[in-house]
Image (tube, grey):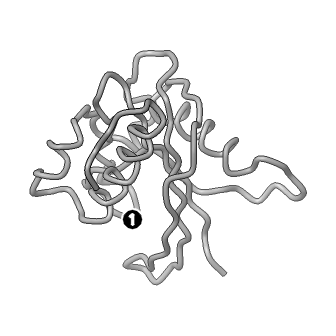
Amino acid sequence: MFIVNVEGAINKDGKWLLVKRSLKEEHAGGELALVGGKVDKVGDSSDILERTLHREIDEEIGVKVSITSYVNSSSFVTNTGVHVVDIVFLCEYQSGAPYIKSPDEVDEIIWLTTEQIINHQQIPIYLKENIQLADRKLKRAIGEDFIE
């Protein structure tokens, strides 16, 4: 078995919303990350990934977003041996002031540009790659030219 996890690459005014995960978190405590969480078992359902992402974002930081596109999927194994499938979506910030709504999951909210994330020494490579992919999708969506 594996866990399905969804994350939102939330962009507002050229910056990405990251959270510093709580040290209480079982996986990646204290690390910078996108907002998201595990898909719950709900039986037959439609739009389960999208509904989960909206719920997790609201539960953790209290904001509303619109999901604009799929970014990436990957798999990994946690330090405790749990297999995870992770799906990242590009999200457009809609409303609400982000705040630490769930201190058991979030220690800090941080807004950074793509360049700041790429150059940040403490951000894991997979997060840098997801932000670069999300940034490309965002630029395509708004019609900006860029060099790959």
Instruction: Name the residue that disc number 1 marks.
Output: 27
Q: Is residue 140 left or right of residue 32?
A: right
Residue 8 percent coordinates (x, y): 48, 44
- Quarter assignment of residue 41: bottom right
Q: Report how many numbered discs are placed on residues in the image.
A: 1
Q: Between residues 136 and 71, which one lies in front from this camera angle?
A: 136
- Amino acid type of the residue that numbered disc 1 sits on in the rendered structure: His
Q: Helix or strand or loop: what does disc 1 sit on?
A: loop
Q: Between residues 102 and 61, which one lies in front from this camera angle?
A: 61
Above or below residue 56? Residue 14 is above
Residue at the top extreme, as displayed: 96
Residue 17 percent coordinates (x, y): 34, 35
- Quarter assignment of residue 124: bottom left
**Residue at left 52%, top 65%?**
73
Residue 56 percent coordinates (x, y): 56, 41
Residue at the right extreme, as displayed: 44
Above or below residue 5? Residue 78 is below
Q: Between residues 27 and 24, which one lies in front from this camera angle?
A: 27
**Residue at left 14%, top 57%?**
122
**Residue at left 50%, top 24%?**
63
Q: Quadrant of the N terminus?
A: bottom right
**Residue at left 53%, top 79%?**
83
Residue neighbourhood size for the residue with mark 1, other residues' Cα within 10 Å, grouped as few (<14), some (14–19), many (≥20): some
Q: Quadrant of the C terminus?
A: bottom left
Q: Is residue 1 left or right of residue 134?
A: right
